[in-house]
Image (cartoon, helix red, strand yellow):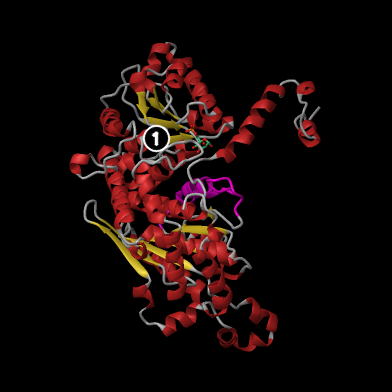
Amino acid sequence: MEGKLATKYSAWKKLETLYATKKSSLILKDLFVEDPERFSKHSLTFTSPSPSVEILLDYSKNLIDEEVLSALFDLAREAQVEAFRDDMFSGKHINTSEGRAVLHIALRNPPVSEGGWDIPEPGAAEVHAVLQHMKEFSDAVRSGAWKGYTGKKIDTVVNIGIGGSDLGPVMACEALKHYSKRDLKSYFVSNIDGTDMAEVLRACDPETTIFIVASKTFTTQETITNAESAKEWFLVTAKDQAHVAKHFVALSTNTAGVTAFGIDKDNMFQFWDWVGGRYSLWSAIGLSICLSIGFDNFSEMLKGAHEMDKHFTTAKLEENLPVVMALIGIWYNDFYGAQTQALLPYDQYLKKFADYFQQGDMESNGKSVTKDGSRVDYETGPIIWGQSGTNGQHAFYQLIHQGTKLIPCDFLAPVETLNPISGGIHHEILLSNFFAQPEALAFGKTESQVIQEIGAQSSNAALVKSKIFEGNKPTNSIFFQKLTPGTLGSLIALYEHKIHVQGAIWGINSYDQMGVELGKVLAKAILKQLPDESKVVGHDSSVSRVAIPFP
Ligand SMILES: O=P(O)(O)OC[C@H]1O[C@H](O)[C@@H](O)[C@@H](O)[C@@H]1O
């Protein structure tokens, strides 16, 4: 129910009781012995024939039994997760604080004539026209038909954007590098730190570089400043303002802002206010992805996401991958008190996946009031972090295995590698680690196993203790056939919908981001004062003093 405190649901109370009474008996080692069918009961498969996608979600290594699961599904029903999902898909303005629809799903929706949903929101009908514009532009640049101001073909693309106008393209271009046009280099500049832009410009030739200025609002200080600097750098060589048209394009909802910047309306790719920044890689914001992998591959990514949308809207709760992942996440977040959630892809191409969902999840569900303004009396969004395997194993896994914190982990891996070098041995080793880690986390190593292993040294009691792995650490394993554009689309949509379901149960607005505003306003006020130290006034004593560090 919209805005209701989750603690008011009777299923929530039941879950509190289950946690209190069952915690000590939810031991993975025992649960697997007691039920030889545990894997088949607690795994789900998502398949799509076109594009071809197969994703297996193995959630058997979680601290759950049938009773806990059933209470979690009751919670989803009581919170009317299905109705809230349908509200999103039908264009209801579920982003209540901003009075907006939430329709990133419309960006990957095929035309109604091809079985797509009929979405009445203004702009939804233009989605395919913008996609066509993206196709024409990316085809022209990739084929060399689009020439720079001196007649040379383009060999470098620089995306200038931040947050949702950067992280999605960065992640997807990295994830789909295998499908990229290798002689078209992609760079991303996001940070206001001039180093970011300066280092990228060192690698660029003004005659052969295109700058994509990506900003939903076209008011973001970092992006506009970076774009102005790029234009200044370009004009040092190009001289004539008229040449800007061949080298700068904009992705935005703000036509007036774009034209004021000096970018022609014809070089603008439109999207709409019902596309949240962190859900915008499906929109014109994906232009850099499109340029890198080509429009057909970009379309496959959209189709893969649409297939997951269909699954989310049609599969019953118990068989619905995003719903299951969301509920299990709530079990740890709100009952076990887990603060974080690690995303651990055993696929180098997915090395930015956790960074991407740091914004996706934390900006969406990092809220502490419900939609009707009540302060929540439970935990909301988890802290998302992680990096690609096996690198993480040599960095932070120690803490996951033997530290004091409970860290639920999602392991992701492809069955097939795109790079079967050295006879496939790398992939075998990678996968052996992908399987070994959840096993080690779940079942650990007992004291008697340690004693047996270290023999004579076992008289050293402290050494024995230090080598014990308590186990019972929960994981999901997500195994997909191969990292294709379609599979990436499905995986991203899977996590998007997980976030949606959790936000619905917590009663919060997952689609605004008021928490990013205050710092921006204060920075602008300080910026005005900074050039003159005597004007740095009206702040706390540390800001006033530190703002002039070297008098
Ligand atoms: O695309 P824009 O408008 O430049 O916004 C960039 C980012 O700004 C803020 O940090 C937030 O609003 C993010 O959600 C957004 O992605």
Dividing the picture into quadrants, the one containing residue 159 is top left
Crowd around label 1: few <14 · some 14–19 · many ≥20 (10 Å)? many
Q: Vertical placement of 303 versus 409: above or below? A: above
Q: Vertical placement of 124 versus 2: above or below? A: above
Q: Vertical placement of 529 versus 80: above or below? A: above
Residue at the extreme left of the image, as rendered: 113
Asked whether mark 1 lies closer than 8 Å to ligand 1, one says yes
Which contiguous range is marked in magenta? 347-376
The residue under label 1 is which amino acid type? Ile
Residue 85 falls within the magenta-colored stretch? no
Q: Which residue is mark 1?
A: 285
- In this view of the protein, which residue sits in the foreground, 148 or 331? 331
Residue at 79 percent across and 21 percent down: it is: 534
Viewport quadrant of the C terminus: top right
| Residue 305 spot, x, y in % from top left | 32, 48
Residue 386 in the figure: left or right of residue 547: left
| Residue 474 spot, x, y in % from top left | 50, 69
Q: Secondary structure at mark 1?
A: helix
| Residue 128 spot, x, y in % from top left | 26, 33
Q: Is residue 500 visible?
A: yes
- In this view of the protein, which residue sits in the foreground, 551 or 302? 302
- In this view of the protein, which residue sits in the foreground, 125 or 429? 125
Residue at 58 percent across and 57 percent down: it is: 379
Residue at 44 percent across and 70 percent down: it is: 69
